[in-house]
Amino acid sequence: MDSASYKQITTSRSYMYSYYRSAHKGPKQAIVLLHGFPEYSDMWAEPVKALEALGYNCIVPDLLGYGASSKPVEAEAYNSEGLSQDIADLLDSEGIDKAIVIGHDWGSYLAGRFANWQPSRIIGLVLTSVAYQPSAKLELEKANARLKATIGYEPFGYWTWIASAEAPRTLHDHAESFFSLLYAQNADIWKTEFTPTGKLQDWLHHDRTVEGAKFITPEIKARTIQKWKEEGFDGKLGWYRAMTENAHWNHEQNLAPENFRLDIPVLFIGGLRDAPAPAALGDLVTKPLCHDYTGKVIDSGHWMLREKPEEWLETVKIWLEAKF
């Protein structure tokens, strides 16, 4: 995406956001695209190009902790109410009343919570990888034990460590090893070497590497690792600390139960081989909470926008045409 189309605002919480805005306003709706960990706004470059060609107006922030946006360390900065207000402030700065919101990974979590906290500002929701769920106080050990008994592995076993004080420095110092595991050619390796308790830090401390995914170019790898090295991980891991320290729950417990039912059109796209975000949760958990739900499972790992970009985009385009 053209760097000249990036703008900056300071939100009502006094955080600075850098974001991309379509240079030419098309005739269709505004779409906000929210990235996840540990990627950046530019992960949406190809979808944005296609959506703009169809007449949509795209707003794509580097979320808190990333790029030129603010990078607070404390978990409270990343609570869902505050982050949702930041996105609302961004819409206000562009004179946009309502938007379709698309997310991936933690961006999907925020997109769903934006619908809870700012229901008057959202007209459609696309969740990639991470299913929408009602709010609950996190009891991580119990959650991992329950899921291991159900699906055979711990999808969130790495959360305690990645939210620890040790993790930012370790990830920075072993960035090449971390990148190798994240973007491995064999997505199933996450079930044994990434998500189970203790496995991620063991991988990093031994500087292990594995064959990389063919959909990751040398340019993407070099650019991403350079950004990680320059910025560090303190802010990025705030998204995990907000979960493990229940910063979200401390706010979300005040929402009325009916706020978690979604009356807007919702599209969930899950990855068949996505270890930390089981695709089955879409129909099991998200669908019952939605008035107008569409589900799709793509044969991909977690990075489906890079692995299966055409299939992801076609799914979104068909849904947009049907609903708007």
Image (spheres, rainbow, N blue to C red):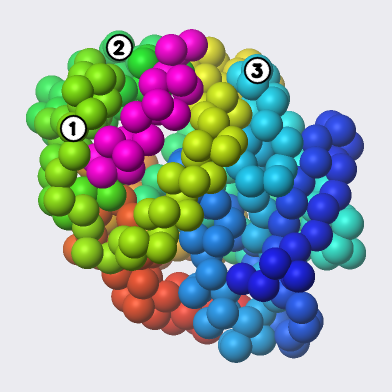
Q: Which residue is mark 1?
A: 208
Q: Position of residue 226 (x, y in %)?
A: 49, 46
The residues tagged by marks 2 and 1 sit, at their Cα atoms, a distance apart of: 27 Å
Q: Judge left or right: residue 71 versus residue 137.
A: right
Whether the magenta-drawn stretch holds residue 61 is answered as: no
Q: Position of residue 312 (x, y in %)?
A: 37, 70
The residues tagged by marks 3 and 2 sit, at their Cα atoms, a distance apart of: 22 Å
Discs 2, 1 touching: Cβ within 8 Å: no
Q: Judge left or right: residue 70 versus residue 215.
A: right
Q: Quick one: quadrant of the C terminus?
A: bottom right
> Which dot marks residue 266?
none
Question: For mark 2, does the 10 Å Cα neighbourhood hold few (<14), some (14 to 19), or many (20 or more) residues?
Answer: few
Residue stretch rendered in magenta on the structure: 164-181
Say above or below: 140 vs 77.
Answer: above
Q: Judge left or right: residue 168 versus residue 269.
A: right
Tell me which residue sits at (73%, 36%) in the image: 70
Q: Which residue is mark 3?
A: 74
The majority secondary structure of the magenta stretch comes to helix
Q: Which residue is mark 2?
A: 141
Question: For mark 3, does the 10 Å Cα neighbourhood hold few (<14), some (14 to 19), or many (20 or more) residues?
Answer: some
Q: What amino acid is labelled 1 in the image?
A: Arg
Q: What amino acid is labelled 3 in the image?
A: Glu
First in residue order: circle 3 vs circle 2: 3
Say above or below: 112 vs 308.
Answer: above
